[in-house]
């Protein structure tokens, strides 16, 4: 089946993206204060539904947040839980992903815009317990509606992934 991961490896896979996001938020806020005086943080929360077709197929509902670290790049963390199906058995499943998102149209000049995300994830299911995976997705984000921005994604991360996402709309930005 593959090598089982130790608890310390899983903790590291979860802690590194969280630490990186914390540093990014701090650095982004400090740069904004130096450049323009106090500004509100641009944390962008999101809610999502994902399907992962891996060794154990899973469906997750997840929450996350990202922060702009440059005009084109957002760093974020997503945590989800749901159900997995493997060998005719059903069990609980979950994941934590640390991702960097590159947006093609950061200033919202077009109604629809492409983006790419990549990073590390930690997946859990009963059949394989925790395992660290490389994550890569392509997405398309739509126009804001009712204070949120819809998006759809496809990619890989422990298997094939597909997701529907809604993020808080930031005026004039993606």
Image: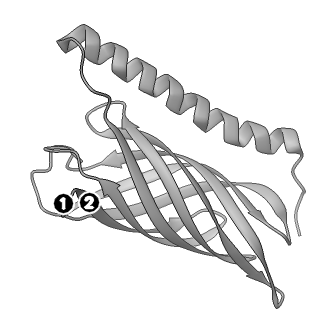
Q: Which residue is mark 2?
A: 149
Disc 1, SS = loop
Give the image location of residue 13, x and y in percent: 71, 42
Q: Residue furthest bottom?
A: 88
Mark 2 → mark 1, Cα distance in angstroms: 4 Å
Q: Quadrant of the N terminus?
A: bottom right
Horizontal side of residue 160 vs 110, given as left or right: right
Check the image and report above or below for 120 versus 27: below
Few, some or many C-alpha atoms within 10 Å of disc 1 (few <14, some 14-19, many ≥20)? some
Horizontal side of residue 81 vs 70, given as left or right: right
Q: How many marks?
A: 2
Check the image and report above or below for 119 versus 2: above
Q: Nearer the viewer, residue 123 or 55?
A: 123
Q: Residue furthest top?
A: 34
The mark that comes first in sequence, 2 or 1, is: 1
Few, some or many C-alpha atoms within 10 Å of disc 2 (few <14, some 14-19, many ≥20)? some
Horizontal side of residue 84 vs 140, given as left or right: right
Q: Which residue is mark 1?
A: 144
Give the image location of residue 41, x and y in percent: 32, 29
Quadrant in the picture for residue 160: bottom right
């Amino acid at each position: 089946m593959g090598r089982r991961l130790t608890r310390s490896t899983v903790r590291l896979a979860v802690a590194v993206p969280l630490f990186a996001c914390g540093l990014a938020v701090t650095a982004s806020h400090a740069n904004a204060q130096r450049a323009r005086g106090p500004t509100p943080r641009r944390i962008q929360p999101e809610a999502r539904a994902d399907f992962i077709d891996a060794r154990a197929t899973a469906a997750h509902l997840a929450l996350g947040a990202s922060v702009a670290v440059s005009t084109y790049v957002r760093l974020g963390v997503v945590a989800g839980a749901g159900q997995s199906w493997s060998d005719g058995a059903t069990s609980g499943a979950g994941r934590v992903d640390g991702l960097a998102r590159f947006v093609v149209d950061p200033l919202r000049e077009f109604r629809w815009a492409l983006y790419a995300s990549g990073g590390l994830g930690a997946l859990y299911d009963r059949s394989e317990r925790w395992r660290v995976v490389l994550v890569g997705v392509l997405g398309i984000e739509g126009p804001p509606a009712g204070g949120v921005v819809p998006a759809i994604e496809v990619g890989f991360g422990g298997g094939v992934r597909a997701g529907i996402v809604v993020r808080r709309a930031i005026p004039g930005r993606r």
